[in-house]
């Protein structure tokens, strides 16, 4: 419960003849801090109470006088301005953190998701295609939304919906059979597969027959040719082995890698339903669902040759997911260029009469681009995600070597900070906003960055270590020691944490947690500079250590929720 909710309770109990609803709607936070922490305007009550607003205000003031939780109760015209007692506030907030811990709960968690399963479809790589910087966003947004949902008590089921079907596999089969060198696959993995694919395209420009061969090869795959299937599976294995390295660096996991290939031939039920509902129409031999009533181009269901499309497979897989998991929400995270695709097939589900169509959620995000000339690349014009992360780690390592050469586990910390910096930067803004990637903004240790928050965490941890503070201690402290403006700023943020996570979940916006972490780190740094902790007298020292402890725990938790780790030393 936050302070405001508590005060509503207090008012409601004391003021028996006023409706709780009116209290809830009236209590406000004044714009000017000098007016107090909360204000209660009384004019709304004038009619029901048959009294002038300023008289009501005077009555209310009398009622509240002597309540320990207010430092000051003041009447200004029709308003009662309330200033909360600072020591009371410190005790109120820290008690809640402690009582969560006593119950074995993490502060801020909730059970709102109990019994509900949320499916998250993210990263969803394309086999034998580059896993490049553009895939960073879906991967880290998905991972953060997963953690936020789990924090709020939801079951999550995470799917890497592989792009492992389509005519490009015919091309891959031909290219591999003609030019493939197993030792190079062994050595260069997915990058080598991509180079074969590129070679196919340039050779096909000179030799049209190759395209016919590719079509035939894909047909053999569809028909279940053993040799073709084995090679195709090999492409998947090679691709997954490579991207796994990136997932490990990012600490990202999936429950399933079931992709498009599973659904390409499981469309009977879908086609029957579409037929029953008379939703299919012919268009030059292809089958489509007309969406002109909804101002959208038609959704393509079957090609002329009877093969399925991206949307067909997505609808089939959504039907499968509903049957298998009875999802509460089925969430897809992709770039905004796919907005139309999702709108189209969501609409088709709705037209088929699926009630769960309203539980399909598309979470789009804006493009990530590079600050010109600042990023090196080893393989042509794609920036492979693995290279980017490795470069971040290397750069971080050299910064640490300069700033803190004696750090023990320098490799581990360089990885946590380097990768964390990239993730943090990605999740710093509204999803839909475009991102320009530049090392200066990612790795800046003083700005609003991952390294800055991590450094604050390490600094606070260091204080606790030096003090030999028993971390997570539930000991009560002298709350009067936490009435200064810097302690109070932290306390207000601590109190706000649960609502921030909830807001991030409701809006599917990890950046709300990222910004929160920056704010809390900033508040802690101000507190740290203004108050001596270790050298303060006993009561102050204890209280400040306790506040430092609570801050570290929440910082670590917030970082976890956006998929960033918190090194103890850096
Ligand atoms: N593989 C697709 C791509 O890279 C993304 C798939 C998203 N998920 C889905 N169910 N359509 O563009």
Image (tube, rainbow, N blue to C red):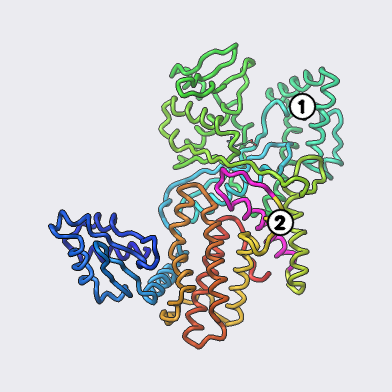
Which sits in the foreground, 107 or 523? 523
For the N terminus, the image quarter is bottom left
At horizontal 39% and vertical 60% (from top left) the residue drawn is 31
For the C terminus, the image quarter is bottom right
Give residue 531's mark. Answer: none
- Coordinates of residue 305 in the picture (x, y in percent): 64, 16
- Coordinates of residue 483 in the picture (x, y in percent): 43, 77
> Is 290 on the left-hand or right-hand side of 388?
left
Circle 2 residue: 440
Q: Which span of residues is magenta-colored?
A: 410-437
Task: Name the quadrant where ligand 1 sits.
Answer: top right
| Disc 1 crowd, CA 10 A, few/some/many (<14, 14-19, 20+) | many
Hey, which quadrant is residue 422 in on the image? bottom right
> Is 512 on the left-hand or right-hand side of 424?
left
Please, what is the dominant secondary structure of the magenta stretch? helix
Helix, strand or loop at disc 2? helix
- Coordinates of residue 389 in the picture (x, y in percent): 72, 53
Hey, which quadrant is residue 26 in on the image? bottom left
Which sits in the foreground, 288 or 526? 526
Q: Is residue 317 above or below residue 62?
A: above
- Coordinates of residue 221 in the picture (x, y in percent): 71, 25
Which sits in the foreground, 380 or 230? 380
Circle 1 residue: 171
Helix, strand or loop at disc 1? helix
Which sits in the foreground, 466 or 481? 481
Residue 433 magenta-highlighted: yes
> Is 207 on the left-hand or right-hand side of 371?
right
Residue 454 magenta-highlighted: no
Discs 2/1, front:
2
- Mark 2 and mark 1 lie on one chain; the one further toward the N terminus is 1
Q: Is residue 259 above or below residue 534?
A: above
């Amino acid at each position: 419960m936050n302070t405001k909710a508590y005060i509503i309770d207090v008012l409601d109990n004391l003021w028996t003849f006023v409706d709780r609803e009116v209290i809830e709607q009236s209590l406000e936070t004044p714009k000017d801090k000098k007016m107090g922490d909360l204000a209660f305007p009384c004019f709304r009550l004038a009619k029901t109470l048959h009294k002038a607003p300023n008289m009501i205000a005077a009555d209310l003031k009398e009622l509240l006088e002597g309540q320990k939780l207010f430092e000051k109760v003041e009447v200004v015209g029709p308003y009662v301005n309330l200033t909360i007692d600072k020591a009371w506030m410190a005790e109120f907030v820290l008690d809640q953190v402690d009582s969560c811990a006593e119950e074995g709960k993490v502060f801020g968690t909730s059970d709102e998701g109990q019994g509900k399963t949320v499916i998250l479809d993210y990263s969803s790589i394309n086999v034998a295609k580059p896993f490049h910087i553009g895939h960073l966003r879906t991967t880290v947004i998905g991972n953060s939304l997963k953690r936020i949902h789990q924090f709020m008590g939801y079951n999550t089921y995470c799917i890497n919906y592989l792009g492992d079907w389509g005519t490009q596999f015919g091309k891959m089969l031909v290219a591999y059979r003609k030019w493939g060198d197993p030792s190079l696959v062994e050595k260069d993995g997915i990058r080598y597969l991509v180079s074969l694919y590129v070679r196919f395209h340039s050779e096909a420009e000179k030799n049209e027959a190759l395209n016919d061969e590719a079509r035939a090869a894909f047909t053999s795959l569809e028909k279940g040719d053993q040799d073709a299937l084995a090679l195709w599976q090999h492409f998947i294995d090679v691709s997954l082995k490579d991207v796994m390295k990136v997932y490990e660096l990012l600490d990202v996991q999936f429950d399933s890698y079931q992709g498009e290939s599973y659904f390409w031939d499981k469309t009977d039920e879908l086609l029957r339903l579409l037929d029953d509902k008379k939703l299919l129409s012919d268009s030059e031999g292809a089958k489509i669902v007309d969406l002109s009533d909804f101002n959208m181009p038609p959704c393509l269901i079957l090609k002329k040759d009877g093969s399925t499309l991206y949307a067909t497979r997505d609808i089939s897989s959504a039907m499968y997911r509903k049957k298998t998991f009875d999802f509460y929400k089925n969430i897809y995270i992709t770039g905004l260029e796919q907005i139309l695709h999702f709108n189209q097939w969501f609409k088709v589900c709705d037209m088929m009469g699926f009630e769960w169509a309203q539980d399909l959620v598309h979470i789009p995000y804006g493009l990530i681009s590079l600050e010109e000339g600042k990023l090196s690349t080893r393989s042509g014009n794609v920036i492979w995600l693995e290279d980017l992360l490795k470069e971040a780690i290397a750069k971080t390592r050299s910064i640490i070597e300069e700033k803190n050469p004696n750090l023990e586990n320098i490799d581990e910390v360089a990885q946590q900070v380097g990768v964390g910096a990239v993730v943090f930067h990605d999740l710093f803004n509204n999803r839909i906003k475009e991102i320009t990637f530049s090392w200066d903004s990612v790795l800046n240790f003083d700005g609003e960055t991952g390294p800055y928050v991590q450094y604050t965490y390490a600094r606070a941890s260091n204080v606790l270590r030096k003090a030999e503070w028993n971390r997570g201690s539930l000991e009560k402290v002298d709350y009067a020691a936490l009435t200064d403006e810097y302690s109070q700023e932290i306390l207000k943020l601590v109190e706000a944490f649960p609502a921030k996570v909830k807001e991030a979940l409701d809006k599917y916006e990890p950046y709300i947690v990222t910004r929160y972490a920056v704010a809390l780190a900033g508040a802690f740094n101000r507190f740290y500079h203004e108050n001596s902790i270790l050298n303060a007298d006993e009561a102050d020292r204890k209280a400040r250590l306790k506040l430092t402890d609570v801050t570290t725990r929440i910082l670590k938790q917030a970082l976890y929720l956006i998929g960033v780790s918190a090194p103890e030393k850096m």
